[in-house]
Image (cartoon, rainbow, N blue to C red):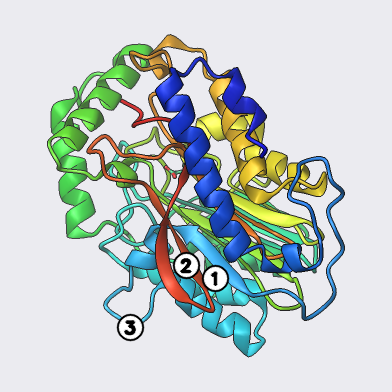
């Protein structure tokens, strides 16, 4: 019976260690029953280090995975993101087009204050959106950063991919590009809800005087953490995004990530979401990975790229995701980013699919501060559902 190497390296107490191993065993069984049926039938090994197998066309069970809002948000309609994407994928539509139509639902839903219209504004109250997409078979990608005034930045990201020679266009240039492509540019993408929460945050910090950056960072973060504790902003909206990845029966893999970024960020801050290799990476021959959570932590390790590279070496998506989380933990050494246990005081989550259609959702922590479990969205032949994210560390980030 194998266990994860990294678990033995942790300074967890015995109880935590046992619990973690048990959780991993349970999940391993779930994979064997579900997502890895093809791998088992064809004798494909899950053991890291094995060569990633080649896949015959038409031999994969289609699946779509996303952050939890891919299941919960419907923008007042009948279908959520993952089932919208899945339904198109099994009809034979292009995988990336299907995924983008899925995330458009979340971008437009004002109830999701971490993506698109009604997303969290920056510190000046302006909603700036980031997105990127990658098409595995076409080996193409496009992205936008700090884009203002366009509700569905994932569409503009796809236009950058399809209609330019570039990958990433940011700021005013991204808006000019969108206008030239025919997108409606709006003055303000705040919803009443996102504006109200920004005002509350602003009231809690000194709005007049730019404190020295360190004090301001601490003041801004403390204000946000207090608002989370008071239940004014859900923790998954402070860090919030949608990443959505899918695979069709032919093994075509694509992915898209779209976000309003870190809540109340310094204007023009761009996180991991639109950066290839960080917020999203797809290699059509091996798999896809994308993230939500503290982008700065992900950027240090370009973790989506790391995960796909691990899968290229034969790792199961779960092992590959855990390797990335471990890297994030190792790279987190600044005191201000550590909790009382000396562990990261934030979470990062990854949503992973490999070329065989095996999938995993992993998180630094499996719980929110409230004790609620962190979940991700899955849609396959069994329909759309939320599943628990597999944690690297016990408890929550606080
Ligand atoms: N990862 C995104 C960022 O850092 C947003 C998030 O998921 O919180 O911008």
x, y percent for residue 315: 74, 45
x%, y% of residue 30? 54, 58
> Where is 124 relative to 311, above or below?
above
Which x, y percent locates residue 206? 19, 22
In this rendering, the answer to whether 391 lies above or below 289 is above
Could you tell me which quadrant the C terminus lies in? Answer: top left
Give the image quadrant in which the ligand numbered 1 is located: top left
Q: Residues within 10 Å of mark 2 (few under 14, many from 20)?
A: many
User: Could you tell me if residue 349 is visible in this image?
Assistant: no
Q: Which mark is residue 100?
A: 1
Q: Is mark 3 within 8 Å of ligand 1?
A: no
Disc 2 from disc 1: Cα separation: 5 Å
Quadrant of the drawing holding the N terminus: top right
Seen in the picture, residue 142 relative to 384 is either above or below; the reply is: above
| Residue located at (74% from left, 63% from top) | 39
Mark nearest the camera among 2 and 3 is 3
Q: Which mark is residue 78?
A: 3
Q: Secondary structure at mark 3?
A: loop
Disc on the earlier residue, 3 or 1: 3
Does any portion of residue 114 appear in the rendered image? yes
- Of mark 2 and mark 3, the one earlier in the sequence is 3
How many other residues sit within 10 Å of disc 1, few (<14), some (14-19) or many (≥20)? many
Q: State the CA–CA distance, disc 3 to disc 1.
A: 17 Å
Name the residue beneath numbered marker 2.
103
Circles 2 and 1, Cβ within 8 Å, touching? The answer is yes
């Amino acid at each position: 019976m194998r266990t994860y190497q990294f678990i033995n390296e942790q300074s967890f107490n015995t109880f935590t260690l046992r619990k973690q191993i048990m959780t991993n065993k349970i999940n391993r069984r779930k994979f064997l029953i579900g997502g890895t049926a093809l791998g088992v039938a064809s004798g494909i090994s899950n053991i890291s280090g094995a060569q990633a197998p080649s896949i015959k066309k038409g031999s994969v069970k289609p699946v779509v995975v996303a952050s939890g809002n891919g299941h919960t948000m419907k923008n007042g309609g009948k279908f959520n993101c993952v089932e919208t994407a899945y339904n198109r994928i099994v009809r034979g539509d292009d995988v990336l087009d299907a995924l983008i139509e899925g995330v458009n639902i979340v971008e437009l839903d004002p109830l999701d204050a971490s993506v698109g219209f009604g997303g969290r504004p920056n510190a000046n109250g302006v909603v700036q959106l980031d997105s990127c997409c990658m098409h595995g078979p076409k080996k193409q990608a496009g992205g936008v950063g700090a884009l203002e005034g366009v509700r569905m930045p994932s569409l503009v990201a796809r236009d950058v991919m399809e209609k330019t020679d570039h990958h990433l266009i940011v700021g005013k240039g991204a808006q000019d590009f969108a206008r030239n492509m025919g997108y409606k540019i709006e003055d303000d993408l705040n919803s009443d809800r996102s504006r109200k929460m920004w005002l509350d945050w602003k009231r809690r910090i000194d709005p007049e005087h730019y404190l020295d950056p360190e004090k301001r960072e601490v003041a801004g973060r403390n204000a946000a953490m207090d608002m989370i504790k008071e239940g004014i902003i859900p923790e998954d909206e402070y860090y919030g995004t949608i990443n959505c990845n899918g695979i069709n029966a032919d093994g075509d893999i694509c992915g898209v990530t779209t976000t309003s970024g870190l809540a109340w960020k310094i204007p023009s801050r761009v996180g991991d979401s639109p950066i290839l290799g960080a917020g999203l990476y797809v290699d059509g021959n091996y798999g896809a990975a994308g993230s939500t959570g503290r982008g700065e932590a992900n950027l240090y390790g370009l973790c989506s790229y790391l995960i796909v590279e691990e899968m290229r070496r034969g790792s199961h998506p779960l092992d590959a995701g855990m390797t990335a989380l471990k890297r994030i933990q190792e790279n987190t050494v600044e005191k201000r980013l550590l909790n009382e246990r000396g562990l990261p005081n934030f979470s990062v989550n990854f949503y992973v699919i490999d070329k065989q259609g095996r999938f995993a959702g992993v998180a630094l922590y499996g719980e929110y501060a409230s004790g609620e479990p962190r979940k991700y969205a899955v849609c396959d032949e069994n329909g759309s559902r939320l599943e628990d994210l597999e944690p690297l560390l016990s408890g929550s980030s606080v």
